[in-house]
Image (spheres, rainbow, N blue to C red):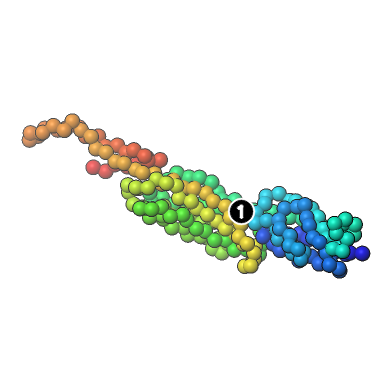
Amino acid sequence: FISVTPRTAGLFPGDEKQFAANIPAYWFTGGQGMLSNTGLYRAPASFTEIDTFNVTACDASTLPSLVDCDRAEVTLLPYTVDVFPTSSTVLPGKDIEFSAVIVPSFPEQTVTWSLSTRPGDPTGVFIPTPPSNTQGTFKTPADNPVRNTEPIVVQACAKRTPSSQPVCDTATVSVRNIQFFVTGPGHTLLPNQTMQLTAFVQGSAEPLKVTW
């Protein structure tokens, strides 16, 4: 009779497990992921819930009846990354603190951060906080006015081990396009005459101090 080893396997996203049979076998599974005709199973790159299913091997000599079969149980274990805050709106030159919540956490895990690019505008920089790098500071572009208001994408990717596949999440930052105006009646003044001028700002998420 056919026999499959190992009998069980717990796998995280992107993990592989080689199953073996004692005789030539036809392999199949009803679960997610990929299974080769040699019994090599690869878990999906990402999933968010625990899932349990069977990997089945049947004696190839009995095809297509599949009368002699054995099974191994596979349990998919989520490994998730969530970046907070998920979206932010800030002024040019402001800093934002981000954090990546990773479940579960592993001693060997590594975390890397990256930023999207915006044509015509500087992107800013992201400075991870050592040693875990699960937190960091995004320093927004300081140029003003901001020409491109397309959101900047902040991405965190975690790897359980140096050889495992990364799992990622993203957040967005919108840098406001600040516009500054000075208005007045526009009269021509004679000596010792006065005119009232008003300064105001558009597109600012925070109060700005005006210095004359």
Q: Where residue 136 sits: x, y (%)? A: 51, 56
Q: Where residue 11 sits: x, y (%)? A: 73, 59
User: Of residues 179 and 16, which is closer to you in this image?
Assistant: 16
Residue farthest left in this picture: 191
Q: Residue at image x 7%, y 35%?
A: 191
Residue farthest right in this picture: 1
Q: Residue at image x 61%, y 53%?
A: 81
- Left or right side of 52 for 134: left
User: Of residues 194 and 47, which is closer to you in this image?
Assistant: 47
User: Of residues 114 and 131, which is closer to you in this image?
Assistant: 114
Residue farthest front in this picture: 64
Image quarter of the N terminus: bottom right
Q: Residue at image x 86%, y 69%?
A: 22
Exactly how many numbered labels are in the figure?
1
- Asked if residue 126 can be seen in this view, the reply is yes
Residue wearing tag 1 = 81
Three-letter residue code for mark 1: Val
The image quadrant of residue 134 is bottom right
- Asked if residue 70 can be seen in this view, the reply is no
User: Of residues 99 and 25, which is closer to you in this image?
Assistant: 25
Q: Where residue 139 sits: x, y (%)? A: 43, 54
Q: Secondary structure at mark 1?
A: strand
Q: Residue at image x 41%, y 55%?
A: 123
Image quarter of the C terminus: top left
Classify mark 1: residues with Cα within 10 Å, few (<14), some (14-19) or many (20+).
many
Q: Where residue 12 sits: x, y (%)? A: 70, 58
- Left or right side of 111 for 89: left
In the rendered image, the vertical position of residue 65 relative to residue 22, given as above or below: above
